[in-house]
Image: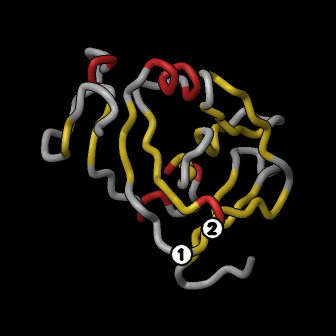
Amino acid sequence: MAVTPKSHQGGCLCGSVRYVVSGDLLYSANCHCRSCQKAIGAGFVTWVAVKTENLEVTKGEITYCETSPGMHRGFCGRCGSSLEGHGDGWEDSFVTAASLDDPKIVKPVTNIYLDHQQPWVIIDETLRCHEKFPD
């Protein structure tokens, strides 16, 4: 996949895995669920949705773990960087915003799973807020 003005590159900390997302970034959310907290090692993770067919690994290989029924989290098998997530039957995939080479292009619009929010995380209340995953 060629890098174009509407494409975005990203990868893991050690450089073993690189990817390109073509086309538009669909939307972005801060997820506060316990699974994300544990997978990332932080109070929340910012995900950005992309069309699954627009995500191409250009170097290395993403290692996957099914962390709950039907939910697959992808990471670098060498350094452990979280990179991608998708669910069985989902049309979109999600990449971790911080794994993009230029993460400032991502503008989260919502917080989800605030019922799992850690008390030391300050919420941007200008974003939409949901206790669970919105319908």
Using the image as rendered, state which of residue 11 and residue 31 is in the foreground.
31
Quadrant location of residue 4?
Answer: bottom right
The disc label shown at residue 84, or none: none
- Residue at 52% in and 60% down: 50
Q: Give the farthest residue toward the front.
A: 89
Q: Secondary structure at mark 1?
A: loop
Does residue 121 appear left or right of residue 104 in this picture?
Answer: left
Q: CA distance from mark 1 to mark 2?
A: 7 Å
Out of 120 and 45, give the one closest to the viewer.
45
Q: Amino acid under label 1?
A: Gly
- Labelled disc at residue 23: 1
The answer to which of marks 1 and 2 sits earlier in the sequence is 1
The N terminus: image quadrant: bottom right
Q: Position of residue 92 (x, y in %)?
A: 53, 54
Colour pattern of the rendering: secondary structure
Q: Which residue is mark 2?
A: 54
- Determine contact: label 1, label 2, CB under 8 Å: yes
Disc 2 secondary structure class: helix
* Residue at the outermost bottom position: 5
Vertical relation: 50 (above or below) 132 = below
Spot occupied by residue 127 in the image (x, y as percentages of width and height): 19, 46
Nearest the viewer among 89 and 103 is 89
Q: Name the kind of residue labelled 2 in the image.
A: Asn
| In the displayed structure image, the side of residue 125 where residue 16 appears, left or right | right
Residue in view at x 50 percent, y 27 percent: 36
Image coordinates of residue 129 in percent, x first then y, are 20, 36
